[in-house]
Structures are given as structure tokens and as C-alpha cells.
Image (cartoon, rainbow, N blue to C red):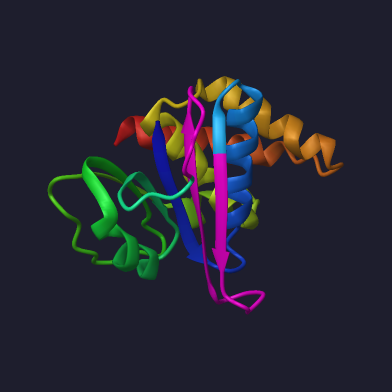
Amino acid sequence: MLSITCAGFGGQGVLTAGLLLAHVSMVSGKEITWVPSYGSEMRGGTASCRLRIGDETILNPFFSTMDTLIAMNQDSVDTFQGAIAPGGVLISNSSMVKDAEFRDDIRVIEVAATEIAGDLKNPRGANIVMLGAAIAATGLVDVEEFADGIDAYFAKKGRSNPLNRECFMRGAQAAAEA
């Protein structure tokens, strides 16, 4: 079972990234829980979600240590890094996390997600870039299968954007090269 936290500030798509992770994992046959947490502000306040994903029934959605942290900003690294299990993975948005001190007992993957999304003309896609890095780093679901799941998720909502797939694949590539 994998315990994951997605964290950032409101407006960065943290909860959407968590929903995508939950939805595509569920469609691929995994058991999931998704617990959001956010401040009262619409944008700019803190936002996070915690997911448990596995092959067996999940009896408790809560956890004190996580396997993976997807951190969209510096505050998220500062707040949640200590709860990553030794040997766990921290995926850091290096576009927004500067000069951070990372633990030496975890794997750190720095991805310039905001810059990558901007270069691809999809500025709201930084969360999708980070999701690509997380899927590649954890091996939770096949990268291509997950990309297909993202396409299907947005198509069902009538918001198809081919740049989302490109963002996702660039994130996966960045993690593979790290």
C-alpha cells in the first residue's frame, strides 16, 4: 500500500492532482482513499490531500508517515518532509522550492514543473507535470496507462486538453532522468 500526500497552495491544482491520482488508480483496479484538506481561502491558502492506494481493502485512510510527497511549494516541503518514511520519495517543484535542505534518507526528485508547464503553453499544468514525476518514481501504474486515464478523466468532463498529456509525459521523463 502506498501513502501519498499532495501539497501546495490553493490554485496550484493540488486537489485536482489528488483526484486524478485517485480516479486513474481506481479505474486501473486499485483500492483508494482520498482525504482533502484546505484553508477557507479560494486561492493562496494551504491545500493538501492524502491518498492511500493499494491492492487490498483500505481500513483506515489516515497515516502518520508517507511513502511519497508531491510538494508544489516551499511551505509544503517544510511542513511535510519530516513525515516521509526513510527510503520514501519527495517530488519537489524546483520552480518554487529554492535552496531547500532535503533529508539524506529519502529520494528527492526535483522537477521544474512550473517552468515546464509554461514552456508547453499550459501554465495551469504544473500539477500534471508533478503527477507524471510521481507516477514514474513510484511505478504505481504504467506511465502510458496513467496518461490515457488523465485524457479519459478530462474528456468525460468535457475539458479535453492535449497539453495535459504532454505535461504529464514531461514530468515522467524528468523523474526518469533524475
Residue at (28, 55) in percent of width and height:
83
User: Which residues fall within the magenta stretch?
Assistant: 33-60
Residue at (63, 51) in percent of width and height:
16
Q: Is residue 148 above or below residue 115?
A: above
Q: Is residue 29 magenta?
A: no
Residue found at the very far right of the displayed protein: 158
Of 67 and 64, the residue lying toward us: 64
Q: Is residue 67 left or right of residue 114?
A: left
Q: Position of residue 135 (x, y in %)?
A: 46, 33
Q: Is residue 43 left or right of residue 140?
A: right
Residue at (58, 30) in percent of width and height:
25
Q: Can the viewer see residue 34 in this picture? A: yes
Q: Quadrant of residue 140?
A: top left
The number of discs equals 0
Q: Is residue 139 above or below residue 132?
A: above
Q: Can the viewer see residue 119 in this picture? A: no
Q: Is residue 44 magenta?
A: yes
Q: Is residue 145 left or right of residue 155?
A: left
Q: Quadrant of residue 71?
A: bottom left
Q: Quadrant of the C terminus?
A: top left
Q: Quadrant of the N terminus?
A: top left
Q: Position of residue 30 (x, y in %)?
A: 55, 25
Q: Position of residue 117 (x, y in %)?
A: 56, 51
